[in-house]
Amino acid sequence: MKQVSNDNAANRSSYVGYVYHKGEEVFKKEVLNSLPAEWSKLHTEGYIHIHDLDAYGKTYNCLTFNLLQNFPYQLFDGLSENGKIIRVFGYFKTLFADMGNEQSGGMAFANFDNDLATIFANLGVKQSKHAEAIIAECIGDFIIWCSNTHTRMGQTSYYITLNIGLAENKFARFIAYALIDEFEKVGATAFKPNIVFKVVKGINRYPGDRNFDLFQKALLCSAKKMIPTFLLCDCASDEGVPPEKLSVMGCRTRVVDDLFGEKTAIGRGNIANISINLPRLALEVDRDFPNLEVMQKIAKVKEKWSGIADTVTEILVDRYHKVCACDANEFPVNRARQLWCIPFDNPQKVFAHGTLSIGFIGLSEMIEVLTGKRYYADEEAYCVAIDFVKFMRHYCDKQREELNLNFSLLATSGELISGRFSEMDKKMFSPDIDIFGKGFYTNSFHVNVDSGLSAREKLTKEGPFHLFANGGSISYIELNEAPIGNDEGLRELVEIAIAAGVRYLGINFPLDSCNNCQATGVFDCCPICGCKNITRIRRVSGYLEILDGFTPGKKNEVRTRTSN
């Protein structure tokens, strides 16, 4: 069955998915029509994008599970050791499937290695060669399930992130090792879940640290399959937060600061986010005030942004209050599993621990319209870019203080809106500088994907922005091909990223896999068997996906990317 649309690269065609998508579009229109005209107009006209519009007032976005506080050990009574191991992974599959249909976004384990080792120890599963063999097989099966299962909404895979790296004992170290090893062995076309390796000095960052060997294995796997990605816990933005409390959800989401509790990601999530189209504001100012000096234009854009952000705040607060007004019984899995930081009895008390994020896309194009220069190529333009992101963060902090809600600034991934916003603006504006020819807007604060900067230069330029994007951010390095075996080279990139202030790092390269003989590389025709039936795997907005399913904007981005 032909896909109705490819708004989401994770979608696969199915009867149920087709019907769901049709109903989803109708419901989204109903939601927009129910909102004040000023709000819905900003969305439909492309000034903003209200993400997960179908979930408005119905559910929250994403969650890092508090896995241990209410783990149902009673379900495993009477089972053999083999049975307990197998059923734990079966429980995980059921948990992700059930929760994936009760929320709109990603799900994460903050410490998969340590938590799983704790669960097995509490179940009386002892580490042995036999137990290790069963666990490794179950992990391999779980990886295949994560990658191949598209039953969420009848068409979409589950956004699962497993954070590892802090293993405290031999059992946890084995689990971390097995997860990386099985992911590496399972083949190129299995590219989920997202595995995040937490890099921490004194634990795994340097030779002599207890888990340095695991870090090396993670680097070697990433050099082959682009996963794991790396959460750099020693960066400036996470300074002072215990690494076990940190987690990546989905493609980059960060939830740490909490007005109503401790700094932690565990048992907390994002409630909703809305992204603002930065190039649109610059294009309007450039058109309406062509004779102003650059800094005067920047001031005008800030004024426009503030007005729109005020409305975005109203929308987020309205959405928050509506989901808080839901009955706890509308979240039966949440109630049964108790995965939030407090008991799921009163949605308002629970969701108060969540975040409301204001996102942005196209900082690079905005600066280019206003200054005539790409921000990473000119020091004055770069200072303007930093100042603007700092300005947006200050606004979010102000809303957090005044409204007593966990507002944050999100460096949006923009899978759909990178193309949507660009195409809408192209029909409205004809700027002197062509920002439309490439067919997409650049994600968040990233430098242009064809910058030609070296890896060090790119990370150095993007690093300072991470400090302000407290709702989540990522930086990528683009390589021409897989750096297989070059763990030292990737480790050097990690060190450069930490020094630059990067919070979360991904390594990108084209990965083609022959569907006949499973050869991998970069090719149109398999060099081994001559087959032209090729699966092309690329990173889109944090996750790995098959290129054919990318949105038009993201396909344009892939064609434009040059290596660092």
Image: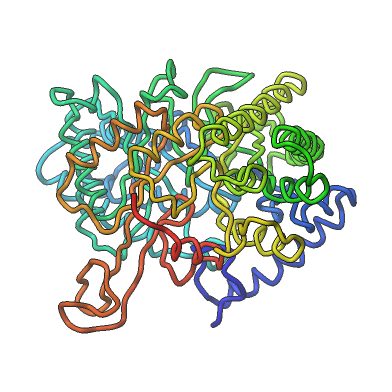
Q: Is residue 162 left or right of residue 287?
A: left
Q: Is residue 400 left or right of residue 447?
A: right
Residue 250 in view, yes or no: no
Residue sticking out furthest to the left: 129
Residue sticking out furthest to the front: 291
Check the picture and name the quadrant holding the N terminus: bottom right
Q: Residue 382 in the image: x percent, y percent?
A: 54, 34
Q: Is residue 543 above or below residue 316?
A: below
Q: Nearer the viewer, residue 383 or 149?
A: 383
Q: Is residue 357 left or right of residue 136?
A: right
Q: Nearer the viewer, residue 508 or 433?
A: 433
Name the image quarter holding residue 360.
Answer: top right
Please tell me which residue is depicted at 64% across the width and 45% down the height of the picture.
366
Please tell me which residue is depicted at 39% across the width and 29% down the height of the picture.
500
Please tell me which residue is depicted at 17% across the width and 39% down the height of the picture.
488
Q: Residue 402 in the image: x percent, y percent?
A: 77, 20
